[in-house]
Amino acid sequence: MAASASSATLAAAPVGIATPSPGAPRIMATGLAFPEGPIAFADGSAMCVEIAGGSLTRIAPDGGKTLVAHLGGGPNGAAIGPDGACYVANNGGLTFASQNGLMLPVGVPADFKNGSIQRVDLASGAVQTLYTHVAGNPLKGPNDLVFDRFGGLWFTDTGKIYPRTRDQGGLYWARPDGTEVREIVYPLTTPNGIALSPDRQILYVALSMTRQIVSFRIEGPGQLTQRRGRPDMTMVASLGGNFILDSMCVQADGTLVVGAVLTGQLLRIRPDGSMLAPIGLPDIAVTNAAFGGPDLQTLFVTLSQSGRIATLRWPSPGLKLLYR
């Protein structure tokens, strides 16, 4: 989720190529405190973080909720690692405004110190903070994360937005055992969602406020293809409109499914930058999605403003995650 969206206005997202649309969404769970970072499983269950609640929550197929761990701060993204634990990008906390049961982030808490990368043992609920700083610099807003084929952890840090200033964001890599973290690309303008291509060689990053998708080629653990001494960044898509790109997941055919906040849509962007028709949902804060179910054709979507998770029967199967 972007640091703040309260001052933007609604506008239509780009219109893409028409394709078969999913069926009507089914509301799976309600009463969540700004859910994000969904993890979906083959049995129809899921997990998500609750940014405003500072927690990691398990959701049964019938919508029943169970607290897995209290994380504090603002847990923003989550992923299962090679050891079976859940890793969380924690933005360190946001302030929220609520009206008529709807919620949106509006600022930074006065006592904010830093964000972090956390590890949660799913059997015990024990929480370990792995990283709070990189080369002496505090993490400002870890947002989303993904594990690569080498077992390493790539994550975005969106930064923080204040009334008249902004912390820069960046792209980072870390070992999941807590022994090493590297700053890979800095600065980046509001990096948010992060995902891998089906061959696990291309790393995609969504830049929230500029409405762009960029990509990098992974060469090895913590290594990207270089050009003139810097990571070689490719522009995949640059979108017009008044909305905010959030997190994303990937179809098995490589199409990116990206949350569009303010317009309440899922955007479908092919690797060549062309777009399929967007899918509208009943919430302006469509922040993230994950494929689950036995055939990976059930999409679990976080409807964050209204505190719900919806499921849709998706027309194309999702990419199977490396670790789940």
Image (spheres, rainbow, N blue to C red):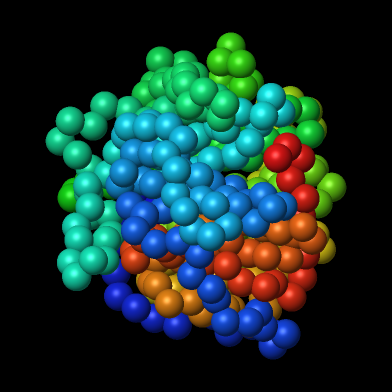
Residue 182 versus residue 22 in the image, above or below = above
Quadrant of res 251: bottom right
Image coords of residue 88 (percent x, y):
50, 34
Image coords of residue 279 (percent x, y):
57, 78
Q: Residue at 65% x, 56% y: name it.
A: 44
Q: In the figure, is residue 292 to the left or right of 173?
A: right
Residue 7 versus residue 140 in the image, above or below = below
Q: Quadrant of the C terminus?
A: top right
Point out the residue furthest to the bottom here: 18
Q: In the figure, is residue 18 to the left or right of 13?
A: right
Quadrant of res 262: bottom left
Point out the residue furthest to the top here: 179
153 and 60: which is toward the camera: 60
Q: Residue at 43% x, 32% y: name it.
A: 69
Report if residue 266 is visible in the image: yes
Numbered-mark total: 0
Q: Residue at 51% x, 50% y: name it.
A: 59
Q: In the figure, is residue 49 to the left or right of 92?
A: right
Q: Residue at 73% x, 37% y: name it.
A: 323
Point out the residue furthest to the right here: 199
Report if residue 206 is visible in the image: no
142 and 224: which is toward the camera: 142
Image coords of residue 101 (percent x, y):
23, 66
Residue 100 versus residue 294 in the image, above or below = below
204 and 280: which is toward the camera: 280
233 and 97: which is toward the camera: 97
Image coords of residue 166 (percent x, y):
29, 44
